[in-house]
Amino acid sequence: MPRNSTTDSPLAPVTIVVGQEDLLLDRAVREVVVAARAADADTDVRDLTPEAVQPGTLAELTSPSLFAERKVVVVRNAQDLSADTIKDVKAYLAAPVEEITLVLLHAGGAKGKGLLDAARKAGAREVACPKMTKPADRLAFVRGEFRTLGRSATPEACQALVDALGSDLRELASACAQLAADVEGAIDVAVVARYYTGRAEATGFEVADLAVTGRTAEALERLRWAIAVGQPLPGITFALASGVRAIGKLASAPRGARPADLARDLGMPPWKIDRVRQQMRGWSGDGVSTALRAVAEADAAVKGGGADPAYALEKAVVSIARASRAR
């Protein structure tokens, strides 16, 4: 096969890993390294930052060896390479060296796009690692983890795990592996609750569930506990916003629609439709707007716009709880 042909093999001459999801980027690199060391246990791996790749560095790393050793050269954040180094990389793409696998990690944006285009034109193998910003993406990730591990998990269990652990893919992957190793038979929501209820109660999702049902004192208690145990503040504002938005979505949905249809249209599992229906009693359209403004103000404070982010979150929780009883 010509050296510049597109291939799905991890040992392709050049692999470009495109995206910003750290866990997936690391897995893509590990896949190449594992394949290379399976072919040659003595494979030399060089994992480099842009600062370490100066003009001439790539030529030095890929120069023929007397021992013809296999080598994997990983360049992270390739979009940040200097203009002269990018010229070196483009020249290398035209004539890759035998027994060497070049892995370029690229964020995928406009910066350094010329290098990305050149690699694609040269027929590089491409692995997509997009940032998982949507809850539905993380839910799909958890389902995929269990499938990869050869285990069955109910949809409710997968959702409960995402609700408990939030947006960190490394934590989600670790939890899936732990459950798969520890639990026999199907993994259901009761199993997830047994393992992670204590953790879930220290997250923003528990705070949000209490706030949107007007339980101010309990929500504030959970908020202070979540902060005390080190929960990321942006994750708490995300959970608060998600809880209020879910109520707004369901409130604006056609009346009388079946739960299955609502779940499909709103991107929620059926069990969550039932839960949100219970939470939305007492809410009005104006209440949703008020609550979202409060969350936006807290989010700005958490991200550096306020002197006391914790206090801003407390104000948001109080505002949400009041809005839930405004009707």
Image: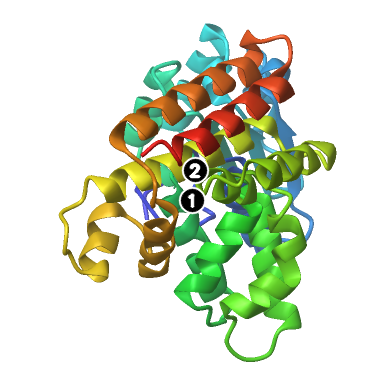
Question: Which quarter of the rendering shows the N terminus?
Answer: bottom left
Amino acid beneath label 1: Ala
Position above or below: 235 against 189: above
Q: Residue at x 50, y 40 (%)?
A: 17
Q: Residue at x 17, y 57 (%)?
A: 255
Comparing 294 with 265, the one in front is: 294
Amino acid beneath label 2: Thr
User: Which one is closest to the eye, mark 1 or mark 2?
Assistant: 2
Position above or below: 304 against 313: above
The tag on residue 12 is 1
Q: Is residue 312 visible?
A: yes
Q: Is residue 133 visible?
A: no
Task: Give the residue at mark 2.
Answer: 15
Position above or below: 274 against 44: below
Q: Secondary structure at mark 2?
A: strand
Q: Residue at x 58, y 75 (%)?
A: 189
Task: Measuring from the top left, give residue 6's x and y in whole percent.
Answer: 35, 49
